[in-house]
Image: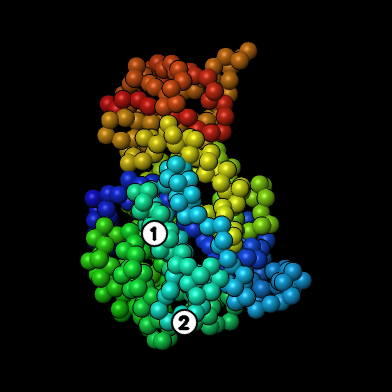
């Protein structure tokens, strides 16, 4: 286990070794599946964000903002129908959890975290206090969380749960959120909602024993005094469980960043970056390839995060029928092909010690990881030599760190390495692609 001073607990090794998880945003918002793909969180002017929100899972909020393109789309495309009609239209008739999880596992994910209740307040299990406003009684008419938990554990992955504790547009009714500076205006803080959310999180713990308890948007003020007892109960139930940091600073085992937001958290001892394959978490039919990571981009993101000591929680947004969009499947299939021979350089690795070797972005792309016996250099964008000769790169590392005589490519292709005054000179073919190749050296 690894000590994380923010909580005083020891973070379970499974989490720090996992490196890669899959987030799932699936809900009634997957029926309209519409948002403007204007950019990534943290890169878009906050004054623009909410009226043109690229998060499809925020559809109910965005259509309530006067003059928003989403409001016009809802009027012309859906006749201004009440949002809850999307719950009844959400059938999940093609949902095959085993198929999803098989793909996630081949792509290298070690844990899976689905949304159990997002900001629209619709629960994906028979949550206490929801009456019939959940997927057991309406829409799919099944416990989607139980189905996913069973499939995830059958594949020996860890199962976690996401819960929107700080925003609920149904049980905690508020005016729509218009700006991040007024975010708290959209959060319910009264005792009745605090009790409602507390009871539901307890139910998730008791039913599903989640390995990750992933809250979002903070916690109602009236219920914060009960959080220490909630966390103690969780750890007693799931001793190797982990808790994220979105409980209004009440407690955390690890910190999170989202797209480009809260990047300062990535300096913590234990952290996780999350984002969608596109600019949205929920499925957005408006997104095209130009808005999405391609397989090489997803692999590079994963490698970059891992090389800096973090985990990547990469999101998929299924369609309302229960299928994964083909564009998202293609990214995960690309990651699976790459992971088939590169997994050892990702899972259960750690960053190099500061000053040992620096990442490179200009010209060749280089990142580093290590385990107890090896150092791994990930390289990409290495130009071929003249007349099609193999590419050549100088890996600039602390003298003595790399033993050139032990250089091997994890994909089995030949590689030549020798020491020089500037570093270790590596020559090998096929390094000119954006997809990284890992070269393994015996650690000294």
Query: Where's residue 125, x and y in %?
Result: 44, 70
Looking at the image, residue 223 sits to the left or right of residue 64; the answer is left
Neighbours of disc 2 within 10 Å: few (<14), some (14-19), many (20+)? few
Q: Residue at x 37, y 82 (%)?
A: 195
Query: Where's residue 297, x and y in %?
Result: 55, 41
State whether residue 39 is above or below residue 222.
Answer: above
Q: Residue at x 41, y 54 (%)?
A: 151
Distance between the alpha carbons at the discs numbered 1 and 2 = 22 Å
- Residue 5 vs residue 53, the one in the foreground: 53
Q: Residue at x 57, y 54 (%)?
A: 323
Query: Where's residue 243, x and y in %?
Result: 34, 62
- Residue 198 vs residue 390, the one in the foreground: 198
State whether residue 5 is above or below residue 388.
Answer: below
In the picture of the structure, the residue carrying the numbered disc 2 is 131
Question: What label does residue 149 carry, if any?
Answer: 1
What is the tally of numbered marks visible in this picture? 2
Q: Secondary structure at mark 1?
A: helix
> Cβ–Cβ below 8 Å for labels 1 and 2?
no
């Amino acid at each position: 286990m690894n000590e994380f001073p923010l909580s005083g607990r020891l973070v379970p090794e499974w989490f720090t070794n996992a490196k890669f998880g899959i987030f799932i945003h699936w809900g009634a918002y997957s029926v309209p599946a519409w948002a403007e793909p204007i950019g990534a969180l943290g890169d878009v002017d906050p004054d623009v964000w909410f009226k043109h929100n690229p998060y499809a899972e925020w559809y109910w909020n965005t259509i309530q903002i006067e003059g928003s393109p989403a409001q016009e789309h809802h009027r012309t495309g859906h006749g201004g129908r009440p949002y809850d009609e999307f719950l009844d239209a959400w059938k999940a008739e093609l949902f095959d959890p085993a198929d999803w999880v098989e793909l996630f596992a081949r792509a290298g994910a070690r844990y899976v975290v689905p949304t159990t209740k997002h900001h629209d307040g619709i629960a994906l299990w028979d949550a206490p206090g929801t009456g019939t406003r959940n997927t057991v009684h309406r829409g799919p008419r099944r416990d989607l969380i139980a189905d996913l938990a069973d499939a995830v554990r059958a594949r020996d992955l860890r199962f976690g749960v996401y819960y929107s504790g700080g925003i609920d547009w149904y049980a905690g009714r508020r005016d729509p959120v218009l700006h991040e500076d007024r975010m708290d205006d959209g959060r319910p803080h009264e005792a009745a909602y605090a009790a409602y959310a507390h009871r539901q999180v307890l139910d998730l713990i008791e039913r599903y024993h989640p390995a990750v308890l992933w809250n979002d948007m903070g916690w109602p003020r009236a219920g914060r005094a009960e959080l220490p007892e909630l966390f103690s109960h969780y750890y007693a139930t799931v001793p190797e469980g982990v808790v994220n940091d979105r409980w209004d600073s009440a407690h955390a085992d690890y910190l999170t960043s989202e797209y480009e937001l809260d990047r300062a958290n990535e300096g913590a001892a234990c952290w996780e970056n999350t984002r969608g394959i596109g600019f949205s978490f929920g499925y957005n039919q408006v997104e095209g390839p130009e808005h999405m990571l391609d397989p090489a981009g997803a692999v590079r993101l994963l490698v970059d995060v891992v090389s800096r000591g973090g985990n990547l929680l990469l999101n998929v947004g299924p369609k309302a029928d229960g299928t994964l969009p083909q564009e998202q499947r293609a990214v995960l299939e690309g990651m699976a092909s790459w992971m088939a021979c590169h997994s050892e350089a990702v899972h259960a690795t750690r960053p190099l010690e500061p000053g040992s070797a620096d990442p490179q972005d200009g010209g060749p792309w280089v990142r580093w990881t290590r385990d107890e016996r090896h150092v791994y250099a990930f390289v990409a964008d290495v130009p071929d030599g003249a007349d099609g000769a193999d590419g050549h790169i100088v890996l600039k590392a602390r003298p003595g760190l790399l033993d050139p005589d032990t250089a091997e490519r994890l994909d089995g292709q030949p590689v030549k390495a020798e020491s020089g005054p500037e570093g270790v000179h590596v020559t090998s073919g096929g390094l000119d692609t954006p997809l990284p190749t890992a070269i393994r050296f015996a650690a000294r």
